[in-house]
Every structure is written in structure tokens, then in C-alpha cells.
Image: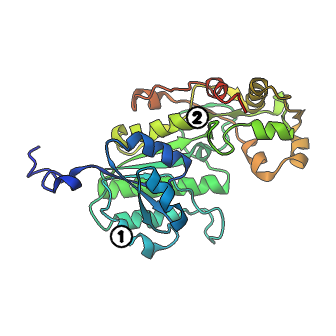
Amino acid sequence: MPSNQSPLGALPARFRRERVLIVGCGDIGLRVARLLRPTVRLMALTSSAARVPELRSHGLLPLIGDLDQQAALARLGGVATRIIHLAPPRSEGDAQWWRDRRTSLLLQALRRRPAPRSFVYGSTSGVYGDCAGAWVDETRAVRPLTPRAQRRADAERAVRHFARTTGARAAILRIPGIYSADREGGTPRERLAKGTPVLRAEDDVYTNHIHADDLARAVVRALWRGKPLRVYNVNDDSQLKMGDYFDLAADLFGLPRPARVARSAARDQLPLMLLSFMSESRRLRNARLKSELGLRLRYPTVADGLRTAQSP
């Protein structure tokens, strides 16, 4: 397309460069930034002025704004040609606990100017609910059971509506458990050291994982190659029940395997958050991730990823 017809080509050179805004620039956002930094102009939304030096050190232009304050988001419209939204919903404090108002306010702000070319939303595989260990691909209807999964499902609906009404190319990534040795709490080592029990085999559930680096690479692929209004399961090739996962990690780290308990006993010994993960079982298919986004996993299984984390 001739430069005088291109939406970007008619602008000065400094504005023709793609501008990517990362909303929720934590560990995964910073990994994404490292992959994108050589080719685009990077920005990150933060509500904390204390994070400004850190974000700048990673080559990001910090934008101060609070996802819980509509007025603070008004200037985001048109600031970026592509958006990566990784910020979680609020966990409490909203009477409509099933809503993700942060995503709604963000999308309202982005409507005030020409829509971004692409929008990537980081959701959770928890929106599928309990599938009794069945194989699950992206065509399966969502049935979120927990409040946090219901808020993510609400955000997914908002993203789809935004894409349909603005023409933005939106991709939704359904993400399971994230692990990595260089991520806070990114391996089971601490839990194993505490001796936290797991479910016995007959009560156990399938669990799914993705290495943080592979997740970051999937985000970048979705930003450029994701199909319109497309959902992608972002998980590796592992087929493990939760107890087997912790046994594998214990063996690799040279720690005792965790005790196995019945589900009835687990209710008395484990926190509610952990029990909620033990109440859902599914095996995610990742064919779309590989065929449409062309992602070749660097860590195809958790065994591959955890071997890089064996040293304390």
C-alpha cells in the first residue's frame, strides 16, 4: 500500500513504528517486552509510580493509570496500535463479583479513538470448569465454577464484543498453571519443602502447565498471527495428574515425595484456594497453538522445564 494511503505511512517516521501497550506488565509482561523490544515501541500501564524505573530499565515507556479509575484511562485511546492485556480482575470489593470491571473500563477507553489493530487477552483455562478429566479443545463451551473464573469469562465476553464492534483483531489465550525457575513461586520446591499433601490417585485430577517463556512467546505470536475472535489453549504437551506432577518435581529436586491423602482429608488440611484447583480436572489440547500460531514449544513437558530448575 502506498505510504499516502496507509494509516501509518502518512505519519512521521517516529509514529509509523508499531506501538504496543502492555496492560498488566508483571513477570510475563516483562518477558514479552524482551521479545518485542527490538522491533516495536513499547509502553506499559502501571498504577504505581514506584515501578517507573523498573519499566524504563526494560525499555518500556511507563504510563501511569489505574484500571479501577475510568478517568485515569481516558488518554489510552489511540496511544497504541496493538494491546496486550494481562491484568487480572479485582479479587474482591465489587458487589457484582462475577464482573471484570477493569477490562470493561479499559475497553471503554480504547473505543474513544481508532481501535487497535490487534488485542491479546490473557484469560484462564479455569473458564472450562470441571471436565472430569476429559480432553478439552477451544470449541468446548465454558462453564466457570469459581468466582475468579467467572470474572475471566465475563472479560472474554467483553473482549469479543469490543472486537465485533470496533474491528480490532482479538485473540483470547486460555492459560493454565505457569511455572519457571526464575519466577516467584514458579516451581513446586517451596510447597514440597513444606510437606503439603496431594490427593491419592483415585481422587486425583489432571492438571495443565506452561513454561513462562513459552507463554511469552505465545503472546507475541497471538499479537501478530492470531486469527480474529480466536481462542487458544496455551499449554504444553504434558498429561499429568497433580500428584504425579509433584512426585516428578520432588524426584528432580531431590526432595521427599508429598504424602497422598483422600479428598475428605484434604478438606481439613489444605487452604480453600488449593482445594479449588483440586476440584477441577481436564486435559487441554494445544493443536491450535501449534498449527495456527506456529509455536514450537521450547519446553514441551514440565519435565523438560523443571530440569532447568534443579539447582536451588
* Residue 234 shows in this picture: no
Secondary structure of the residue carrying numbered label 2: strand
Q: How many marks?
A: 2
**Alpha-carbon neighbours of circle 2 within 10 Å: few (<14), some, or many (≥20)?**
many
The amino acid type found where label 2 is placed reads Ile
Instruction: Tell me which residue sits at (49%, 47%) in the image.
Output: 30
Near mark 1 (Cα within 10 A), the count class, few <14, some 14-19 or many ≥20, is some
- From this view, report whether residue 186 is shown above or below residue 292: below
Image coordinates for residue 44, horizontal then vertical, percent: 43, 57
Residue at left offset 38%, top offset 58% = 162
Between disc 2 and disc 1, whose residue precedes? 1
Q: Nearer the viewer, residue 58 or 89?
A: 58
Q: In which quadrant will I find the C terminus?
A: top right
Residue 75 is tagged as: 1
Q: For numbered disc 1, what is the local secondary structure?
A: helix
Image quadrant occupied by the N terminus:
top left
The residue shown at (51%, 38%) is: 215
Instruction: Please give the residue where the numbered disc 2 appears in the rendered image.
Output: 210
User: Can residue 246 be seen from the camera position used here?
Assistant: yes
User: What amino acid does circle 1 point to?
Assistant: Arg
Q: Quadrant of residue 229?
A: top left
With respect to residue 270, does 147 lie above or below? below
Residue 274 placement, left or right of 27: right
